[in-house]
Amino acid sequence: MNNTMRQSTQKLLQQRLMSAIVLPIVLLLLLSGIFISQTLHLLSALSWVDHTDRVISQANLVQKLLIDIETSNRGYLLTGDPAFLAPYEQARTQIDPELNELRRLVRDNPQQSQRAAALLQQQTQWIAGVPQVLALVESDRATLRSSLLSRKQQMDAMRRLMTDFIAIEEQLRDDRVQTVRQTTNSVVTSSLGFSLAIGATLAYFSGRQLQKVARTYRQMVDSLQQSLDDRTATETALSNSEAQIQENYTLLQSVINGTTDAIFMKDREGRLRLANARTAQILGRPVQELLGAADDEVLPPEVARDVTAFDRRVMSTGRSQVFEESVPVNGEIRTFLSTKDPYVDAQGNIAGIIGISRDITDRKRVEAQQQKSAQRLAALQAIDRAILRLDAPHDIAEAALIRLLQTVSADQAAVMVVDLEQGQLQVLGGTMGGDPAGTIRAITDNVSTDVLLNREAVWYIKDLSTLVQIQQVPLWDRLIAEGYRSFIAAALMVEGNFTGDLVLTKREVDAYSAEDLEIVGEVANQLAIALQQSQLRDQLQRYASELEQRVAERTAKLEATNQELEAFTYSVSHDLRAPLRTMQGFAQALMEDYADQLDDLAKSYIESIVEDAVQMSDLIADLLAYSRLGRTQINPQPVDLREAIQDALKQLSAEIQEKQAEVFLPKFLPLALAHRSTLVQVLANLISNSIKFVEQGILPRIRIYTEADQHNYQPWVRLIIEDNGIGIAPEHQERIFRVFERLHGVESYPGTGIGLAIVRKGLERMGGRVGVESALGQGSRFWIALPQAVLSDREANDSTHPTAAH
Ligand code: ADP
């Protein structure tokens, strides 16, 4: 519903309300007027009744006074007693005024006025005759009587007059009361009639008017309700979308302000249209002050120029771009990585830019530091590598200088070493103060020893020309003359001793940063160590070559002694065997030729001599074998292990038979690189031990087999000899391979203690290895390992068929 309609409805409602209110008011006013006039009418009727009442009562008073006058006169006249005259005296004074009052009261009524006047006249006459009459009391009684009679008649006339008067007044009063009653009735009736008529009219009229008003009102209410509904709906929709917008805005605002990045918008003229809290913080002004401000109003001119140029580029290209911008924040230049996008309005025109700037100062700083320390590390590593590669101190010094100067610049640099004892210094690498590498000078030519030793480890002079103690450091004199200003001397310290300096100088004043000094210090330390290592290496080499020479000399001597010893052992063993054989021969001759002459004791002595001689012979044979092994020329050849084992078993056939030993062999065994006779001896010794070292009453069972082995990535063969003998405790397993080491007495198990020593030596000579795995009472597994001669897959470990070796 539109406004005009609503206004006309309102007007109509007003008119209807007006007429509904005005008409009843007019009718009520009319009714009130009628009521007032009726009431006034009634009141006047009532006042007349009241007036009549007063006339009647006044008439009664006058009548009473007349009676008093007459009765009092009569009493006196009858009695002669003056006491009776008292009421007369009183009434005589009152009667005239009262009569006049009565006359006044009936002024409006002419008839009654006449009567009252007549009464006054008669009364005055009557009173005037009183003294005369009274005088008659004493004198003339007859006259009195007649006078009395006439006076009585007068009085009666007056009384009648009075009675009439009163009767007329009462009649009048009755009439008037009647009038009042009628008036009251008419007033009540007419009022009732009027009221009913007006009430009905009003009711009818009001009803109609109210219906109209109600209709109009309802229409209006409806229309209002409609517009209210419309409005509510619109308001709800509005408030919903407003709430949504508000929520989105709040969200956006909190995102924008919550981020640590600066977010801002600028219009085409470069004026800020939006700025978040971080932007305000960076620019050092509240957001309100920033809005509308151009770049040159919030940034220093040169920064503003760049920023404006970047923004223009984004707007002209219409493409998002990333810039690195440097902006002063709290007096410190900070770097921002700014991403700027063109901002497009509803018509699709570029209206400005939207930018997000991230503070990357710390990142850049870290990156720069990382780069610097990477460079530093690279330089130090390069120096390290150079040091490892190079031996000569001069080369090390030059290499260190080259690497150092790639990181820290210098116009002149040198490594100088000092010999404090000699009081000399040498330029080891580089050039300094006109001295090329190799120059040797007295220390004091450059600096007083005092100054040299009592200064900081990294000594930095920002400007040589400002110094005063030049005489103590003549080098500076020369450097100043050549135009150098900055000067660094980093001490080369080795185990707390000063050994020299790494010196850098530059023409620029205060050319070095704290970091440069650190790097120079680190390189100096490295260099000092390198130079010391180089010295140590020299020394070591000297010692090593000395040592080598000494070892060679001693080895030669030892070899000679050894050969002598072996030759001696051989000849001794050899020479000992001849008398032993003789001794054995004679003992045997004694037994054979003089058996009958010898008693049993003598025979047992001879047996002992023979046994010991055999033992001694075995010992000498073993020793000879051992000694021969040392001198035998060993040329390893492929040897069939099976054949070698068969040879050994052949040698042992008597023992095998005697002990009823069983030896199990696989059908095929590989070839090994070995010295055949030595290998046969080794195998014979091992198998012989396996037969020998068994518990009494146990038949020896020996299993021989091979396993693939490897040594220095070469295929080897491992031959294992496994027995069911007495076993060897782990703690003895090493020493049994040494000469004369035995674990049992000759009485229990005969032997010389050389068998396993021969095994070890034989294998050593053939380039093989030997070992044992065993536990006491659980048999032993001796193994020998040799290079495999021919790659063969015939490594059958089939040991199911015992080799007949009995
Ligand atoms: P010998 O056999 O002459 O005593 P060896 O040098 O051959 O000397 O052996 C040294 C010692 O090693 C032996 O005395 C013995 O105690 C122990 N031994 C060697 N082989 C075995 C074996 N197969 N079982 C138990 N003990 C052994």
Image (spheres, rainbow, N blue to C red):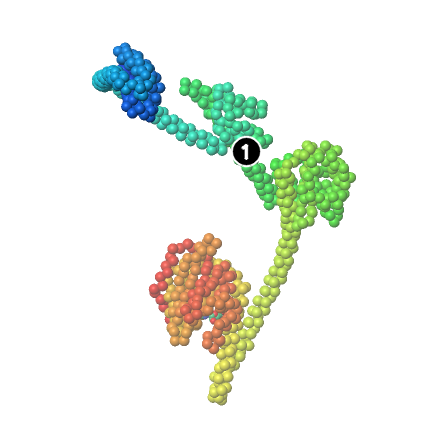
**Residue at 46% from the left image edge and 21% from the top image edge:** 318
In percent of width and height, residue 208 lies at 23, 17
Q: Amino acid at mark 1?
A: Thr
Q: Is residue 683 left or right of residue 579?
A: left
Extreme residue toward the right, this view: 471
- Residue placed most toward the observer, 413 or 757: 413
In percent of width and height, residue 649 lies at 41, 68
Could one spot residue 587 in this view of the protein?
Answer: yes
Q: Is residue 662 left or right of residue 40?
A: right
**Mark 1 crowd level (few <14, some 14–19, many ≥20, 10 Å Cα):** some
In percent of width and height, residue 149 lies at 25, 17
**Residue at 69% from the left image edge and 41% from the top image edge:** 459
**Residue at 64% from the left image edge and 36% from the top image edge:** 513
Residue 518 occupies which quadrant of the picture? top right
Extreme residue toward the front, this view: 139
**Is the residue 91 above or below the residue 483 in the image?**
above
| Residue under pointer 1 | 361
